[in-house]
Amino acid sequence: MDEQYYTEQPPTIEAAKPIISIVGRPNVGKSTLYNRLTRSRDAIVDDRPGVTRDRMVGVGRVGANPYWIVDTGGIESDNEEIHSLMRDQVEFALQDSDAVIFIVDGRDGATAVDIEIAKQLRQKPQITVYLAVNKAEGLDRALVASDFYQLGLDQPSIISGKNGDGVVRLLNRVLSETEGRRQAENDGYAIPEGVAKLAIVGRPNVGKSTLLNTLVGEERVVVYDMPGTTRDSIHVPFKFGEKEYVLIDTAGMRKKSRIDDRVERFSVMKTLRAVELAQVVAIVLDARDGIVDQDNRLINLVFESGRSLMILVNKWDGMSGYERDQVRTQIDRKFGHMGNIPIEFISAKLAKGVDVIMPLVDRLYESAMTNMGTGRINRILKHAEEKRNPPMVGNFRIKMKFGHQGGMNPPHVVIHGNQLDKLPQTYQRYLSNTFEREFDLIGTKVRLSFKTSE
Ligand code: GDP
Ligand code: GDP
């Protein structure tokens, strides 16, 4: 084994990905840029009137830096209400993003709607706004920028979403500045080491608050007077038995008394934020609705984020045998391929089936935070290779030399060798599955990355 180039470093915990929203009036090129910036597409349905296109949330990466990117949706351009709809859209982006990319059309110059959006964006100086002048291919950069200084925003980035000019530079700028801000943004509560962070997510009314109260009791959850926590804190420490946990509460689960909370819309970005900060995510579904599109997309987003995941099918009480079979069939069809994700059928209201949940939280936490050990990783790799050889590429066999753990939450293994960029998906899956089995991991997939040496 050729380990001379490698010095052991402890696995790092993957940082939360920043959430970047794209705003701008219709036809400036939001969805074109979104498509360029994402590898995965997950449409999130938003039922606000006047919105013609689904809000899209996807994950992307520049170099080693991942991010969530949100296309805040399309608005009917002929609509007379465009001003108020734009206002809502921008407000939504400002609420939950770490950074906003404001796109304008370099060929149109600054329009009245642009000026209005800029004014609204300037009112929240704590969110950094990046002005992107789009459709600039073939145009004089200085000239195209000059019309937009009147917006009173930062130095504009001149880009073309269509052919990619300036896009990576813009993203690098956003990511380098946003990371620093996120680290400063802390609600003051230091989480003790070894304490699991849990997020309970799902559509409105599926039973999240009911579940939380059933699990830990209202009086123990509403702990505003813990040292270091505040009323608005998103970190809510609680105890179950003798063990400490932290609930990540960004969806206002504890503040249900206000009338307008009941009509609070499902916020994908708040959900994402909670997911990013957690190690363990419980997704709650309402069995009476079956598995709706939004559940499906949410599960895929969480799965993609790498956080350890369990699915809780709630309101299982009072369902007929036939209805239950239907839900089970749907779940098998949609999530069967995810393999090691625990699925439990519960009634939060009647406290049925809930006893397994906190022990599962512990197991999922251990999975997320497993320290795999370089020695063991290499034994497993060697064994896996002996059992099933990587394929030939031309006259050469792909060769794995050694591996080590690259990170936790999700568990991540880095493999060094020759021609690893040609390792087929099927073989990569075989390796991930092998690691998951050997380390008894549930709820998450082991990530692999490859370093090819000569
Ligand atoms: P959105 O409504 O803001 O999401 O805008 P779209 O992404 O749908 O783009 C609107 C139109 O502008 C489409 O016809 C795109 O092909 C075009 N477009 C987008 N980006 C560019 C660009 O960088 N250069 C040029 N020339 N056209 C673009
Ligand atoms: P949240 O918006 O996801 O936090 O949902 P809530 O906890 O506020 O619950 C929404 C509604 O579903 C309330 O009327 C609850 O009483 C009801 N509910 C929650 N869990 C169950 C359950 O297990 N069975 C039944 N039948 N109703 C439930």
Image (tube, rainbow, N blue to C red):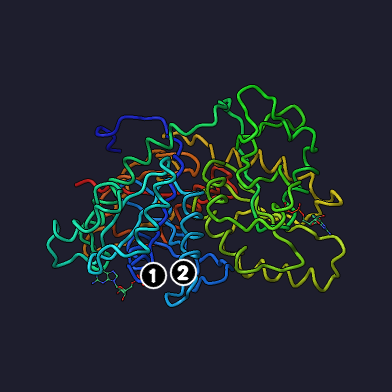
Question: Is 355 drawn above or below residue 159 in the view shown?
Answer: above
Quadrant of res 324:
bottom right
Q: Which residue is mark 2?
A: 82
Quadrant of res 403:
top left
Circles 1 and 2 in contact, beta carbons < 8 Å: yes
Please name whichever residue, 255 or 50, is drawn nearer the observer in this view of the structure.
50
In the displayed orientation, state which residue is furthest to the bottom: 78
Picture residue at 58% right of the left edge, 29% below the top: 194
Along the horizontal axis of the image, is 409 left or right of 264? left
Decide: few, some or many residues near mark 1? Use Cα within 10 Å; few <14, some 14-19, many ≥20. Answer: some
Please name whichever residue, 46 or 213, is drawn nearer the observer in this view of the structure.
46
Decide: few, some or many residues near mark 2? Use Cα within 10 Å; few <14, some 14-19, many ≥20. Answer: some
Which quadrant holds the N terminus? top left
Splitting the image into four quadrants, where does ligand 1 fall? Answer: bottom left
Picture residue at 44% right of the left edge, 53% below the top: 431
Please name whichever residue, 294 or 106, is drawn nearer the observer in this view of the structure.
106
Residue 215 at x, y = what percent? 78, 41
Three-letter code for the amino acid on which mark 1 is drawn: Pro
Question: Is 291 drawn above or below residue 384 in the view shown?
Answer: below
Picture residue at 60% right of the left edge, 50% below the top: 309
Residue at mark 1: C-beta within 8 A of ligand 1? yes
Residue 349 at x, y = what percent? 84, 52
Tell me the CA gap for discs 1 and 2.
9 Å
Q: Secondary structure at mark 1?
A: loop
